[in-house]
Amino acid sequence: MDYSEITRARMWSDVDQAHALYTDMRQNDPVSLIQTEEYRPFWAVSKHADIVEIERQHEKFLNTQNSVLIRKKDEDIRAANPVQMRTLINMDGAEHAEFRRLTQDWFMPQNLKTLEAKVTEIAETFVDRMLAMGGECDFVSDIAIWYPLRVIMMILGVPEKDEALMLKLTQEIFGSEDPDMQREGTDEERMQFMMDFFMYFSQMTADRRANPGDDVASVIANAVIDGQPIGDMEALGYYVIVATAGHDTTSASTAGGLLALMQNPEQMNKLRNDISLLPHAIEEMFRWETPVKHFLRTATEDYTLRGRSIKEGDRLMMMYASGNRDEEVFNNPFEFQVDRRPNKQIAFGYGVHRCLGHLLAKMEMSAFYKALLERTTDIQLNGDPAWIHATFVSGLKRLPVRFIAR
């Protein structure tokens, strides 16, 4: 097989083919050197144990440099630009820990407990919306992209009227390689789009500094780093990572989970008949979908991984979707099991860079699926699903369904 296909966004147009390639890599070349014309060389790490080994050694393998696969020409453009928007995924060490601490309490169990009733209310609202559609809908465009967005915007402090703008930000960032989602216009027009967001969040910062509230935007706007107010670009990066990562991955997992249930009706029935399995089912949905397909790490010293000689400065791609199908970790990994135990899924990453909002994501999906399963008697596919073409974050872009309300 041509392992360089992992650099092609179109690979995710056929999920089964993508997983067949991953399986071949795990079995025959689990730490594979990928060399192409478009990208600088990197090691593709496909085994669960190897991903964990790399990510637990965060001082030897940095997230700061080139944290996501981008083309050489785009790397060069970024390198020539002295002003960069930086997010948590571009930080390491003490800096990463300090920035992460700013909002960490917001996403811990004690605080999430205070949000549970509101999240449940939002989940019920979107199930209401679905059931009002007359027995069929596109679950992605009608429900899945909007529900997690409403939750994270509520937490961030963005008014409901601006949710469509925030959705556009997510789609511009994560769907830029998809032919159905590519932004149109000149480079100048695309730059203006980002400037519009910069102005939006700059105004938010000014407002929250003058009138701090009980939301994450107020925490970010009034943050102090090393004794100084947070910088404009760092604040912008924080808003963007909360608005996008807090929405898109949960959206993809919510839709992917429903597709898995519909494709495995015996598992759907098992969950309907025993809703106490829901926490396990949610973990399985994240394993099954794994919306974040990769992150890159850069070696700070020579290292041997599974017999391969990694050199200082080499890049390694953590292939989470492959790790979550690893036969050495998961029994029958290509079976969707709502009662899978144990489930060592790594859809949220591992170690100090593990997704800050993973508990919120699980709470959102639990609230939604509890309401959905209790208020329907049947949900089935109503056409062909389709996936976003993307190498970084990918999930369903179409999921036509039909359903019967209880």
Image (cartoon, rainbow, N blue to C red):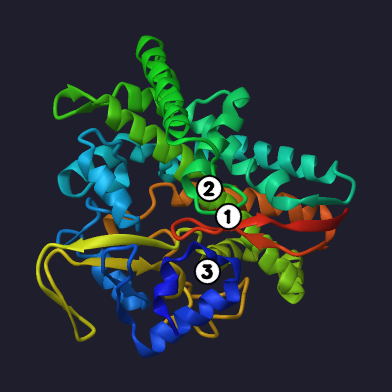
- Residue most extreme to the bottom: 28
- Closer to the observer: label 2 or label 3? 3
- Under mark 3, the amino acid is Met
Residue at the location (30% across, 34% down)? Answer: 102
Q: Are marks 2 and 3 in contact (CB under 8 Å)?
A: no
Three-letter amino acid code at the position of disc 2: Asp
Q: Position of residue 213 (x, y in %)?
A: 44, 18
Real-space Cα distance between discs 2 and 3? 19 Å
Does residue 286 appear left or right of residue 37 in this picture? right
In this rendering, does residue 3 appear at all? yes
- Residue closest to the eye, 234 or 194: 194
Which badge, 3 or 1, is on the more N-terminal residue?
3
Residue at x-position 35% and y-position 30%: 236
Residue matched to label 1: 252
Q: Amino acid at mark 1?
A: Ala
The residue where tag 2 is placed is: 248
Dividing the picture into quadrants, the one containing residue 98 is top left
Q: Are marks 1 and 2 in contact (CB under 8 Å)?
A: yes
As drawn, 74 above or below 42: above
Tell me residue 163's x, y (percent). 59, 30
Secondary structure under the numbered disc 3 in the rendered image: helix
Is residue 262 shown left or right of residue 396? Answer: right
Q: Which residue is mark 3?
A: 11
Task: Please tell me which of labels 2 and 3 falls first in the chain.
Answer: 3
Q: Write the residue at 67% across / 68% down.
A: 260
Q: Quadrant of residue 117?
A: top right
Q: Secondary structure at mark 2?
A: helix
- Give coordinates of residue 309: x percent, y percent: 16, 80
Asked if residue 328 can be seen in this view, the reply is no
